[in-house]
Amino acid sequence: MMLSELLHKYCFHDSSIKTISYEADQRELTILVYLCNWIQEYYTEDMKEVVLLELRFNNASSVDNTGMFNEAAILSCEVVLKSDQSTISIFTELWADPQSRSDNLQYKTLMVKADSVDVILHPSISDYD
């Protein structure tokens, strides 16, 4: 799907990034997100409130420092459309020291250029494994 379609289908506010990995030779960025399912338009009470969503960005570029975003809370997302590729900006907040959570919060933006994104929903995984 196109990046703009991703943001029309899913609301990422208050969700969190579990992990990010980038395969440079395949130009594929994978982000595992604990998605707040209860915010989604399609949500019904018989569904899990939090699910794992796998985002695979195809032909991804402009990706660096992905490790710093592990366990980051997502505040908002936006897509900038260009003629050749789209860029998604993921605005996050994260602890300076995630283990102790005693340091100040930091606000970081992850920007990813990609042609498209594949979305895989893992509803059978527990809320926070």
Image (cartoon, rainbow, N blue to C red):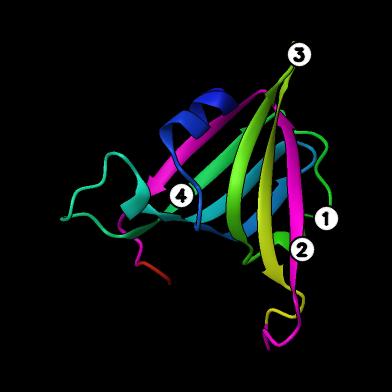
Q: Earlier in the sequence, mark 2 or mark 3?
A: 2
The x, y position of residue 59, in whole percent, is: 71, 28
Which residue extends farthest top?
83
Assess whether mark 4 and mark 1 are in contact (beta carbons under 8 angstroms): no
Q: CA distance from mark 2 to mark 1?
A: 6 Å
The x, y position of residue 10, in whole percent, is: 44, 39
Q: Count residues near mark 3 (Cα–Cα under 10 Å), then give few for <14, some for 14-19, many for 20+.
A: few
> What range is drawn magenta here?
99-126
Q: CA distance from mark 2 to mark 3?
A: 28 Å
Q: Is residue 110 magenta?
A: yes
Q: Which mark is residue 84?
A: 3
Assess whether mark 1 and mark 2 are in contact (beta carbons under 8 angstroms): yes
Kind of residue at badge 1: Asn
Q: Is residue 49 left or right of residue 18?
A: left
- Image quadrant where residue 115 sits: top right
Kind of element beneath mark 2: helix
Q: Which residue is mark 4?
A: 53
Q: CA distance from mark 1 to mark 4?
A: 21 Å
Q: Count residues near mark 4 (Cα–Cα under 10 Å), then give few for <14, some for 14-19, many for 20+.
A: many
